[in-house]
Image (tube, rainbow, N blue to C red):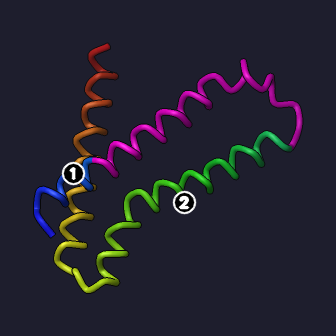
Amino acid sequence: MKKIGLVWQAAAAALGVFVYTSAVSWLLFNGEAIFGKAESFLMPVALLLLLVFSVAVVGVLIFGRPVWLYLQGAKKESVRLLLLTLAFLFVITSTVLLLNIVI
Protein backbone atom coordinates (compact mmCIF):
# COMPACT_ATOMS: atom_id res chain seq x y z
CA MET A 1 0.00 0.00 0.00
CA LYS A 2 1.29 3.46 -0.81
CA LYS A 3 2.49 5.59 2.06
CA ILE A 4 0.35 8.55 0.95
CA GLY A 5 -2.69 6.28 1.02
CA LEU A 6 -1.98 5.46 4.64
CA VAL A 7 -1.58 9.14 5.47
CA TRP A 8 -4.97 9.97 3.96
CA GLN A 9 -6.62 7.04 5.71
CA ALA A 10 -5.12 8.08 9.03
CA ALA A 11 -6.18 11.70 8.54
CA ALA A 12 -9.71 10.60 7.64
CA ALA A 13 -9.97 8.35 10.71
CA ALA A 14 -8.70 11.10 13.03
CA LEU A 15 -11.05 13.62 11.42
CA GLY A 16 -13.92 11.15 11.84
CA VAL A 17 -13.12 10.88 15.56
CA PHE A 18 -13.04 14.68 15.81
CA VAL A 19 -16.39 15.08 14.05
CA TYR A 20 -18.03 12.34 16.13
CA THR A 21 -16.70 13.67 19.44
CA SER A 22 -17.73 17.20 18.44
CA ALA A 23 -21.28 15.97 17.80
CA VAL A 24 -21.43 14.15 21.14
CA SER A 25 -19.94 17.18 22.91
CA TRP A 26 -22.58 19.42 21.33
CA LEU A 27 -25.27 17.02 22.51
CA LEU A 28 -23.89 16.97 26.06
CA PHE A 29 -23.42 20.76 26.11
CA ASN A 30 -27.04 21.31 25.05
CA GLY A 31 -28.48 18.27 26.82
CA GLU A 32 -30.50 20.11 29.43
CA ALA A 33 -32.07 22.38 26.81
CA ILE A 34 -32.91 19.40 24.60
CA PHE A 35 -33.97 16.80 27.16
CA GLY A 36 -34.78 18.92 30.20
CA LYS A 37 -33.43 18.49 33.70
CA ALA A 38 -32.53 14.92 34.66
CA GLU A 39 -35.25 13.80 37.04
CA SER A 40 -35.01 10.04 36.76
CA PHE A 41 -32.60 7.16 36.85
CA LEU A 42 -32.79 6.88 33.05
CA MET A 43 -30.62 9.92 32.31
CA PRO A 44 -27.44 8.51 33.91
CA VAL A 45 -28.18 5.19 32.21
CA ALA A 46 -28.53 6.95 28.86
CA LEU A 47 -25.26 8.82 29.40
CA LEU A 48 -23.39 5.65 30.28
CA LEU A 49 -24.86 3.90 27.24
CA LEU A 50 -23.75 6.87 25.13
CA LEU A 51 -20.27 6.47 26.59
CA VAL A 52 -20.19 2.76 25.72
CA PHE A 53 -21.48 3.46 22.21
CA SER A 54 -18.91 6.24 21.77
CA VAL A 55 -16.07 3.98 22.83
CA ALA A 56 -17.21 1.42 20.25
CA VAL A 57 -17.49 3.99 17.45
CA VAL A 58 -14.13 5.61 18.19
CA GLY A 59 -12.54 2.17 18.59
CA VAL A 60 -13.74 1.18 15.13
CA LEU A 61 -12.56 4.49 13.65
CA ILE A 62 -9.09 4.17 15.16
CA PHE A 63 -8.48 0.41 15.19
CA GLY A 64 -10.81 -0.99 12.52
CA ARG A 65 -8.70 -0.51 9.41
CA PRO A 66 -5.36 -1.32 11.10
CA VAL A 67 -6.77 -4.60 12.46
CA TRP A 68 -8.17 -5.44 9.02
CA LEU A 69 -4.78 -4.73 7.41
CA TYR A 70 -3.05 -6.83 10.05
CA LEU A 71 -5.36 -9.76 9.43
CA GLN A 72 -4.70 -9.42 5.68
CA GLY A 73 -0.98 -9.85 6.36
CA ALA A 74 0.06 -6.21 5.93
CA LYS A 75 1.57 -5.97 9.41
CA LYS A 76 3.96 -3.06 8.79
CA GLU A 77 1.26 -1.00 7.09
CA SER A 78 -1.14 -1.83 9.91
CA VAL A 79 1.19 -0.51 12.60
CA ARG A 80 2.11 2.50 10.47
CA LEU A 81 -1.57 3.36 9.92
CA LEU A 82 -2.32 3.08 13.63
CA LEU A 83 0.62 5.31 14.56
CA LEU A 84 -0.26 7.85 11.86
CA THR A 85 -3.87 7.93 13.06
CA LEU A 86 -2.76 8.51 16.64
CA ALA A 87 -0.35 11.22 15.46
CA PHE A 88 -3.14 13.03 13.58
CA LEU A 89 -5.41 12.64 16.59
CA PHE A 90 -2.69 14.13 18.80
CA VAL A 91 -2.34 17.13 16.46
CA ILE A 92 -6.11 17.67 16.41
CA THR A 93 -6.34 17.35 20.20
CA SER A 94 -3.43 19.74 20.70
CA THR A 95 -5.02 22.24 18.33
CA VAL A 96 -8.36 22.10 20.14
CA LEU A 97 -6.66 22.52 23.52
CA LEU A 98 -4.61 25.44 22.21
CA LEU A 99 -7.73 27.08 20.78
CA ASN A 100 -9.45 26.59 24.13
CA ILE A 101 -6.60 28.42 25.86
CA VAL A 102 -6.48 31.24 23.30
CA ILE A 103 -10.25 31.83 23.07
Name which residue type carries label 1.
Trp
Q: Residues within 10 Å of mark 2 (few under 14, many from 20)?
A: few
Name which residue type carries label 2.
Ala
At 27% from the left edge and 16% from the top edge, which residue is drawn? Answer: 102
In this rendered view, identify the residue nearer to me: 39 or 46. Answer: 46
User: Tag count in the figure?
Assistant: 2
**Which range of residues does the magenta coloring cover?**
12-41
Residue underneath mark 1: 8
At 30% from the left edge and 80% from the top edge, which residue is drawn? Answer: 70
Vertically, is 56 above or below 26?
Answer: below
Vertically, is 71 above or below 13?
Answer: below
Q: Left of 47 or right of it: where is 97? A: left
Quadrant assignment for the C terminus: top left
- In the image, is residue 34 part of the stretch drawn in magenta? yes
Residue underneath mark 2: 56
Q: Residues within 10 Å of mark 1 (few under 14, many from 20)?
A: some
Residue 39, percent from left and from top: 87, 31
Question: In the orientation shown, which residue stands out farthest toward the right?
Answer: 40
Q: Disc 2 or disc 1, which is closer to the eye?
A: 1
- Dot 2 or dot 1: first in sequence order is 1
Residue 95, percent from left and from top: 25, 31
Q: Secondary structure at mark 1?
A: helix
